[in-house]
Image (cartoon, grey):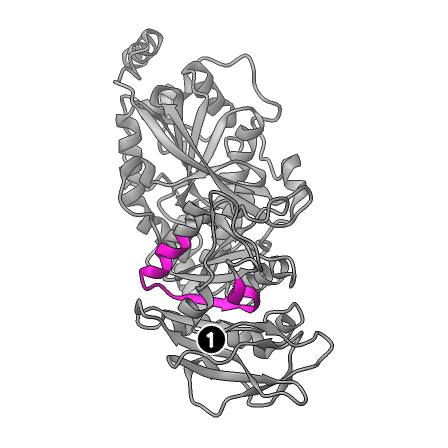
Amino acid sequence: MLSRILLITSMLLGVCNLVSAESLKLTLRKQVPLEPGSSNFHTLSDEETWKGDQTALIVCDVWDTHNCKNAAFRVAEMVPVLNRVVKEARRRGVTIIHAPSNCMSFYQDHPARSRAQMTPAADNYPEDITQWCYQIPSEEQGVYPIDQTNGGCDDDPDEHAAWQASLRPLLEEEKWPWRRQHAAVEIDPERDYITDQGDEVWNILEANGLSNVIMTGVHTNMCVLGRPFGLRRLSTAGKNVVLMRDQTDTMYDPRSAPFVSHFTGTDLIVDHIERFVCPTILSTQLIGGKEFRFADDTRPTLAMLIAEDEYETAKSLPEFAIDTLGHDYRVLKVFATPSDRNQVPGIESVADADVLLVSVRRRVLPEKDLEVVREFIAGGKPVVGIRTASHAFSLRKEAPPEGFADWKEFDAEVFGGNYTNHYGNQLKSMITIADVEHPVLEGIPRTPFQQGWSLYKTSPLKPEATVLMTGAVEGEDPEPVAWTFRRKDGGRSFYTSLGHVDDFQNPTFQQLLKNGIDWTLEGQ
């Protein structure tokens, strides 16, 4: 009883959170439609400064174990970094709320649990603050990106059976195996809170004047989004809420639609959140270092630079990213603004990619934006071009507007090409595979096929190019259609003048493009 009296007294005096608060300088990432009704989005970043003593960090359902072995192992891999985040946030005056749902009996005598229970009740509870939230109105604008109806466990069946057998003693006592928050995430008994109730979380936020919330924990597509204290509920209740996107995981099984890797499934959920729920941040903004990635997430990052209106690659490339690249690559999509053809918001993200795919037609960019592309290529990084990439950054007979820059030699310098024009759209061209052995041609039938649209005039290529496919129209000499190129900076490039929307319907083209991307990364 005495300890409870002392706890109440300390809370009333406001000494539980008596720390020297510091500011948090955060980069909030969100996604906005290219234009009203568009299914494609710009990824934008805003710099904000949050006061530590006006901010809460919630650790959602980071349990000590899980029904799914892979889920449990991934949490165990993540928690050392998460604990560093919690400690640094606490040091800056952030209020830490530990929310391991269904585990309150374990903490019934813990001061942090008592502190949450005894926080004064708020007088402004949001509607349904004690209930799960499965969707908010803004999400109706999109399509939920993954199928999680099977529960999302990605265990191998035999491993899962063995794991369940090991959990049997725990499951005989309760319907779930977890008992507490993972022990690697430290709880400060003098300052932190423990609760799994939406109204108690709201009490803590209101009693401490906390308008900002950082959400961490698992699983993004379930508890993090849907709990009474989750992203949906708090964002609609008016809090400035963000997801720490590299301190979370998703319950997604790659054997379910859209049949991508587990980690791409997480990326798709993060995209959904950034579009329809709230912005996201990274742990690096608190603790420095590199973005946390799971050891099994070995996907290289491919940036797609999409700025053309002729061949519908704003539609075909995002579909290709899911259908063909979804297992092997983390894909960033960077689009030009439809209403301003020479503006490409978010182009700075190209700098962090491992490989760049260019689908751009006759655009000039602000000088600093084109410099991002130039520096990427000068660093010897891989580049892939399709169709109009041969004349990506050059106008026909115009000079760039003031403050904008072109790159007329892009085709020759980056791809070893020599685009001059194209044959008439009415002339059907047949594509022939060259009689060479090359990794880009692996798995590709040697049967000629019809090109989706006009044949480009691309010859002569530079001597460093290796031609893999040619195309021909009746009565004209063949033209190179696909080739590899070793640049002077040492980087690898792959280019194909295919890329019409009809080409993307051809499995041979899809395999060619995937192989070309893979080849550019070999030896990196």
Relative to 182, 212 lies left or right: right
Q: Which of 461 and 373 is in front in this view?
A: 461
The extreme right residue here reads 426
Query: Does residue 259 appear in the picture of this structure?
Result: no
Q: Position of residue 321 (x, y in %)?
A: 54, 62
Magenta part, dominant SS: helix
- Residue 388 belongs to magenta span: yes
Question: Residue 402 location, x and y as percent?
Answer: 49, 43
Q: Is residue 226 above or below residue 114?
A: below
Looking at the image, residue 206 lies above or below residue 159 = above
Residue 456 drawn above or below residue 443: above
The quadrant of the rendering that contains the N terminus is top left
Question: Looking at the image, which is closer to me, 390 or 113?
Answer: 390
Where residue 54 sits: x, y (%)? Answer: 39, 20
Residue identified by numbered label 1: 515
**Could you tell me which secondary element the residue under label 1 belongs to?**
helix
Measured along the vertical axis of the image, is residue 145 above or below residue 497? above
Q: Residue furthest bottom?
A: 435
Whether residue 357 is visible here, answered yes or no, is: yes
Residue range (magenta): 372-391
Front residue (pair 265, 124)? 265
Mark 1 residue type: Asn
Residue drawn at point x = 44 percent, y = 52 percent? 67
Magenta residue check for 178: no
Q: Residues within 10 Å of mark 1 (few under 14, many from 20)?
A: some
Left/right of residue 111 with respect to residue 371 in the rendered view: left
**As rendered, which of 153 and 457 lies closer to the eye?**
457
